[in-house]
Amino acid sequence: MKLRIVAVFTSLLVAITPATAAHAADDPLLDQLAAIPGLSVVSETQGTGYRFFVLTYRQPADHRHPKAGTYEQRLTLLHRSSDSPVVLSTNGYGLAASPRPTQTEPTALLNANQVSVEHRFFTPSRPADADWSDLNIWQEATDEHRIVTAFKTIYDGRWIQTGASKGGMTSVYHRRFYPNDVDGVVAYVAPNDVINPLDTAYDKFFDTVGTAECRTALDNVQAEALRRRDRFVPRLAAEAAEQGWTFNRSIGTADRSFEMTVLDSVWAFWQYSSEADCASVPTAATATDDEIWTWIDTVAGWSFYTDQALEYYWPYYFQAASQLGWPSLRFEHLRGLRNHPGLYTANSSLPKELRRTHNPVPMIDVDLWVRTAAQRMLFVYGENDPWGAERFRPSRRDSALYVAPGANHGANISRLAPEDAAEATATLRRWAGVQSTLSTFTTGLPIDDMLGDHRRNLAGR
């Protein structure tokens, strides 16, 4: 029997703003949107040179059984011109509660339209009676395939897909299952956990990243925090009581939450900091409790491994446990200091009813396809980003991989070496059929870092 969980959330009201209604009768774009079955306009914002729509699109909860039930998937449309290329942005998580007009780096480089998709099962894009077995990479890829097919009735030019971190992974999976939907993919900082138990690449990364002095300082403060467990766990429990945080639905206890946060701290440092920040690492032997506590809170966040913070990320952890994989680290320098040796897994952050046995087949299949058959795929990684320790390795079929020197999980084309940035930009524009002399960043819209409000540590995929 399939597990079913009822998701409670506030439904989006399908409405057209008064300003939109006033000119809907002579608005070709609104007419085209209205002609797409299952698509509804929630709101519209107009700016200089663009229109921005928040939309919902009715999707089958299970594409293999389309008559068994539906849900409303949230998406946004940044429209510039029906003649411009389209960038499909998949962030792998939810959209902002109140989406605002922003553009991805490829959108700016191409002066393109942009369709941004909320990943299934991130609320509110979740079936009312959610069958969590429907949360897998093929189902989401099929969501995106239906969206692309629908919007090609409006935009019949070139399409480029992009995403960062888990969004980059999502763009790869869509390309795997529907290779003809778009004309190219730019995947930023996308991890590739092919065979989850064979994660030695992550340990090798932490053995070599940065300077030896910085690595030692980080290891020492991590170990020292665990040595002060008898003082730090009561402190976390007291703060949880004050803030209304609980642990019983997923991570389990304050002690487990404390240990997981400490284990995350070095990873989080390299994910979102730089080598220049090594000077901020406390000296373990002389640091006060407050100094260590504050540093870990800054880089990892004591509030994250609580029921209140984890619930939003349950769809991510579910996917990591069941298909995507997660980093398995040895933590050799922490021997004898850990109370929970099996804690560092995706299942530890899920309620018991959502925990799953890992199936390695989907990632093995995707990895083999990317290496041997994928075409027009561009991967960008940060040199000092731990998520890049296991990278996708694209085929030689008009594809490439670039590494931004010294960059972290925010790596993008603009942070590449100048010659690499020029080459990657030229490739992207060629795929999109755009003149290479097109000026960039012309609209004044902010560039979306594509990582949104995702947590600045382990779940920041």
Image (cartoon, rainbow, N blue to C red):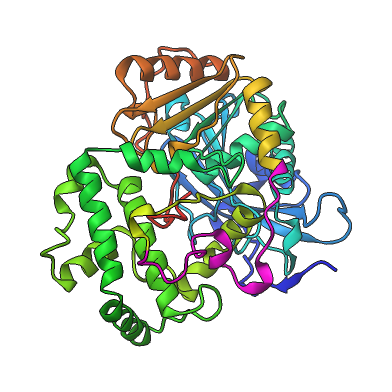
Q: Nearest the camera: 33 or 414?
A: 414
* Quarter placement of the N terminus: bottom right
Direction from residue 60 to residue 341 in the image, left or right:
left
Q: Is residue 307 above or below residue 287?
A: below
Q: Nearest the camera: 15 or 408?
A: 408
Direction from residue 346 to residue 380 in the image, left or right:
left
Give me the residue at 37% from left, 55% from top: 456
Q: Nearest the camera: 352 or 23?
A: 352
When asked about the image quadrant of residue 68, the answer is bottom right
State the image coordinates of residue 211 (x, y, percent, origin top left): 22, 38
State the image coordinates of residue 245 (x, y, percent, origin top left): 42, 80
When asked about the image quadrant of residue 194, the answer is top right
Count of all numbered marks drawn on residues in the image? 0
Q: Nearest the camera: 459 or 352?
A: 352
Give, as a single range, the part of the protein colored magenta.
Answer: 336-361
Direction from residue 22 to residue 210 in the image, left or right:
left
Give me the residue at 37% from left, 87% from top: 241
State the image coordinates of residue 40 (x, y, percent, origin top left): 68, 54
Is residue 70 in view from this perspective? Answer: yes
What is the magenta segment's predominant secondary structure? loop
Indicate whether residue 350 is drawn in magenta: yes
Is residue 103 in view from this perspective? Answer: no
Indicate whether residue 114 is drawn in magenta: no
When asked about the image quadrant of residue 304, the answer is bottom left
Q: Is residue 128 above or below residue 437?
A: below
State the image coordinates of residue 315 (x, y, percent, origin top left): 60, 60
